[in-house]
Image (spheres, helix red, strand yellow):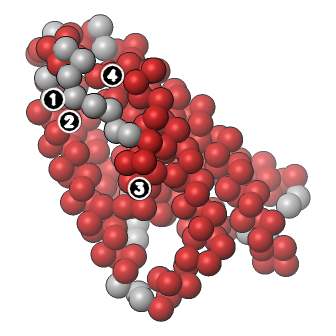
């Protein structure tokens, strides 16, 4: 892959990984409620799960969607319903202090599985694979796209978790916490709508 293409791919991955979306909003909320250390399995699950999805789709799963064209839309809408449920949980969550460490952050496996129903993830993954893969050397291109995503995604996810953790003291007030939770829930639902609209 040429250096200019690699630079463009890295920028694409950065923009896709740092901008608000279901993963980042959930990582922010996890950082607020559970802190950085307890959110690490969630963070690593996002990074590994998304890179794994890019690799699997790039190396052949797309043929399954060609054969069964209703499968991908069904997954996206099931994913959207799941994210609405998560948004409701975020909206109703108590302040970090009141939560008293209760509840559990999203596990590594749950975060990995979540990537398969994340509409924004599908759009970004398919966009990268179709735009930056060199068909003369397709397998190597898929490996490069996957590796760049993993490298770029990790610090972007860490930024969102750390941002949430740094906000936890300010959100100890029930009034501020409720406003924050409602805003995060609304943004999560909004990110779903935007992703589905781009299908």
Q: Which residue is mark 1?
A: 93
- Name the residue located 71 percent from the left edge and 49 percent from the top edge: 148
Badge 4 local density, few (<14 within 10 Å), some, or many (20+)?
Answer: many
Q: CA distance from mark 3 to mark 2?
A: 19 Å
Q: CA distance from mark 2 to mark 1?
A: 5 Å
Q: Is the residue under label 1 in contact with that under label 3 (CB below 8 Å)? A: no
- The reply to whether residue 182 is in sight is no
Q: Is the residue under label 1 in contact with that under label 2 (CB below 8 Å)? A: yes
SS of the residue at dot 1?
loop
Q: Which residue is mark 3?
A: 113
155 to the left or right of 8: left
Point out the frontmost of discs 3 and 1: 3
Q: In the displayed structure, would residue 64 be above or below residue 10?
A: below
Q: Which residue is mark 4?
A: 34
Q: Is the residue under label 3 in contact with that under label 4 (CB below 8 Å)? A: no
Outermost residue to the bottom: 67
Q: Which residue is mark 2?
A: 90
Badge 3 local density, few (<14 within 10 Å), some, or many (20+)?
Answer: some
Q: CA distance from mark 2 to mark 4?
A: 13 Å
Q: Position of residue 114 (x, y in %)?
A: 38, 53
- Name the residue located 14 percent from the left edge and 23 percent from the top edge: 94
Looking at the image, tell me whether mark 4 or mark 3 is earlier in sequence order.
4
């Amino acid at each position: 892959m040429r250096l200019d293409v690699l630079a463009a791919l890295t920028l694409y991955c950065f923009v896709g990984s740092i901008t608000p979306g279901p993963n980042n909003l959930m990582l922010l909320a996890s950082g607020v409620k559970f802190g950085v250390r307890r959110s690490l399995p969630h963070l690593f699950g996002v990074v590994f799960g998304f890179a794994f999805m890019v690799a699997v789709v790039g190396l052949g799963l797309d043929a399954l969607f060609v054969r069964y064209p209703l499968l991908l839309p069904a997954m996206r809408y099931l994913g959207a319903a799941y994210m609405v449920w998560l948004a409701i949980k975020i909206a109703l969550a108590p302040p970090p202090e009141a939560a008293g460490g209760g509840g559990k952050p999203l596990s590594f496996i749950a975060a990995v599985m979540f990537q398969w129903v994340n509409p924004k993830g599908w759009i970004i993954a398919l966009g990268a694979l179709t735009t930056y893969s060199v068909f003369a050397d397709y397998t190597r291109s898929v490996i490069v796209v996957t590796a760049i995503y993993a490298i770029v995604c990790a610090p972007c996810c860490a930024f969102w978790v750390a941002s949430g953790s740094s906000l936890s003291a300010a959100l100890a007030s029930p009034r501020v916490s409720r406003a924050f939770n409602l805003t995060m829930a609304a943004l999560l639902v909004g990110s779903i709508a935007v992703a589905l609209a781009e299908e």
